[in-house]
């Protein structure tokens, strides 16, 4: 049996935790070379005991200095950056690295680890949306295989195996509609952040749960899918599917329609991204005939979910405009979670930001490097905060 050498960037987040659980349940198959966190050191310590890794990264400098000795006592090597670990630990390519650090904070590590692995699974949508051209260039250079991990993108990736993208007529990505699906537009102004983070089907972090409630997560998923699969934006469609059982539907020009369904459990795409063509069993629920007989697909109410209008501005190429969209939305969601703005402010103020002449002009400008993206992101975040302060 071949033991896979694996690393996990962002092992203490929801995707990382699910990856750790899969490894724990199949520990005979893996040698975990490293785990990482930003500040959740207690969880990281617990994970090192569960899957016996000998190296970790703590990205936050303060946390690194504070907890370094605890790992050394356990004879675990601890680093403050991926590059530090790479120089000391990774002598030849690993079999698989999971990139699950959320936000643009994960961009640098995502790009820097490509030359260190045969397969890279990226669950960081911000990196793909803002820097796909930079990622793709490095993937090609080092002949590293890319695997998308978001359930929608993994399902598209799976359905397109042995198919040419030129034969694709339409791709449907489903959206649960989030916790406020059945509320009217006027009721949304008074919803609370504590309710917005309660996703009806998925166990996710606060930020992505709010994005699900506004449907911005689907806007990002369409952009992400266009970049990954190089399929024209006008071939994508979002449909509401409250049960989150169907993840994507592809209609081909030959008349065939392929559908991929599974329970709303991120362990399923993660498990299959690790094992790929090697057949292994994962314990899942029985086929739910009640859901299959009541798929209940419907069009999105664009008066309520106005975030879909942002897709009209997105081109079939990677530009700095996507960094504006990602960064402003991130900041607005954070302000909403902290109860500084109301729910409808997120989309209203996001519209103001992206229509700013300074930022709207970036729709034709490509990012040349990571620095371009990070510098712009910081500027947009500051502008967004200042806008909201003036409003208050």
Image: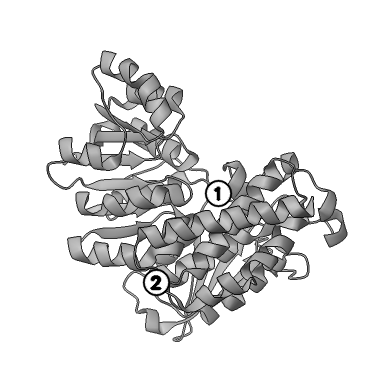
Question: Which residue is situated farthest in the left direction here?
Answer: 91
Label 1: element kind = loop
Q: As drawn, which residue projects farthest toward the top?
A: 73
Q: Residue at x 21, y 49 (%)?
A: 116
Position of 288 compared to 169: left or right?
Answer: right
Q: Residues within 10 Å of mark 2 (few under 14, many from 20)?
A: few
Find residue 17 and report its horizontal and vertical position in percent.
Answer: 44, 36
Considering only vertical position in the picture, is 16 above or below 348? above
Closer-to-camera residue (188/137): 137
Whether pointer 2 and pointer 1 mark residues with C-beta atoms closer than 8 Å, the reply is no
- As helix, strand or loop, the secondary structure at mark 2 comes to helix
Position of residue 142 in the picture relative to residue 380 (left or right): left
Between 124 and 250, the residue placed more toward the observer is 124
Nearest-to-viewer mark from 2 and 1: 2
Location of mark 2 (residue) = 229
Residue 5, compared with residue 48, is above or below; it is below
Location of the N terminus by quadrant is top left
Q: Residue 133 falls in which quadrant of the image? A: bottom left
Percent x, y of residue 99? 37, 47
What is the residue that sits farthest to the right in this orientation? 186
- Can the viewer see residue 97 in this picture? yes
Residue holding disc 1: 264
Report the side of 20 relative to 196 (left or right).
left
The structure's colour scheme is: one colour
Q: Would you say residue 259 is visible in this rendering? A: no
- Front-most of 309 and 351? 351
- Side (left or right) of 99 relative to 4: right
Q: Please tell me whether residue 218 is drawn above or below residue 366 in the rendered image.
A: above
How many neighbours does mark 1 have within 10 angstroms: few (below 14), some (14-19), or many (20 or more)? some
């Amino acid at each position: 049996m071949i033991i896979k050498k694996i690393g996990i960037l962002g092992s203490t987040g929801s995707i990382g935790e699910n990856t750790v659980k899969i490894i724990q349940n199949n520990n005979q198959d893996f040698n975990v070379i490293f785990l990482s966190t930003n500040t959740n050191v207690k969880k990281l310590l617990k994970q090192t005991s569960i899957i016996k890794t000998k190296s970790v990264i703590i990205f936050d400098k303060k946390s690194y200095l504070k907890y370094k000795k605890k790992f050394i006592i356990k004879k675990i090597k601890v680093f403050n950056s991926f590059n530090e670990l790479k120089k000391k630990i990774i002598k030849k390519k690993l079999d698989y690295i999971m990139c699950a650090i959320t936000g643009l904070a994960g961009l640098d590590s995502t790009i820097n680890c490509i030359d260190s692995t045969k397969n890279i699974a990226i669950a960081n949508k911000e990196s793909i949306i803002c820097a796909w051209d930079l990622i793709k260039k490095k993937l090609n250079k080092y002949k590293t295989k890319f695997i998308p991990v978001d359930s929608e993108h993994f399902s598209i990736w799976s359905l397109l195996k042995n198919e040419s993208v030129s034969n694709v007529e339409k791709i449907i990505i489903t959206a649960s509609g989030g916790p406020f699906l059945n509320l009217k537009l006027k009721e949304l102004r008074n919803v609370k952040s504590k309710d917005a983070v309660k996703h009806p089907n998925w166990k996710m972090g606060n930020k992505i749960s709010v994005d699900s409630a506004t449907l911005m997560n689907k806007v990002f998923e369409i952009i992400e899918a266009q970049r990954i699969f190089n399929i024209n934006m006008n071939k994508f469609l979002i449909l509401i599917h409250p049960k989150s059982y169907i993840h994507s539907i592809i209609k081909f020009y030959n008349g065939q329609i392929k559908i991929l369904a599974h329970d709303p459990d991120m362990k399923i795409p993660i498990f299959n991204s690790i094992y790929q063509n090697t057949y292994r069993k994962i314990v899942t629920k029985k086929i739910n005939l009640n859901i299959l007989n009541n798929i209940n697909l419907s069009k999105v109410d664009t008066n309520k979910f106005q975030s879909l209008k942002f897709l009209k501005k997105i081109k079939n190429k990677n530009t700095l405009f996507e960094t504006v969209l990602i960064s402003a939305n991130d900041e607005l969601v954070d302000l909403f979670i902290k109860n500084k703005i109301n729910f409808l402010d997120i989309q209203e103020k996001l519209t103001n930001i992206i229509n700013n002449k300074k930022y709207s002009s970036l729709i034709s400008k490509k990012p040349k490097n990571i620095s371009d993206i990070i510098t712009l992101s910081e500027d947009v975040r500051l502008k967004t905060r200042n806008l909201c302060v003036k409003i208050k």
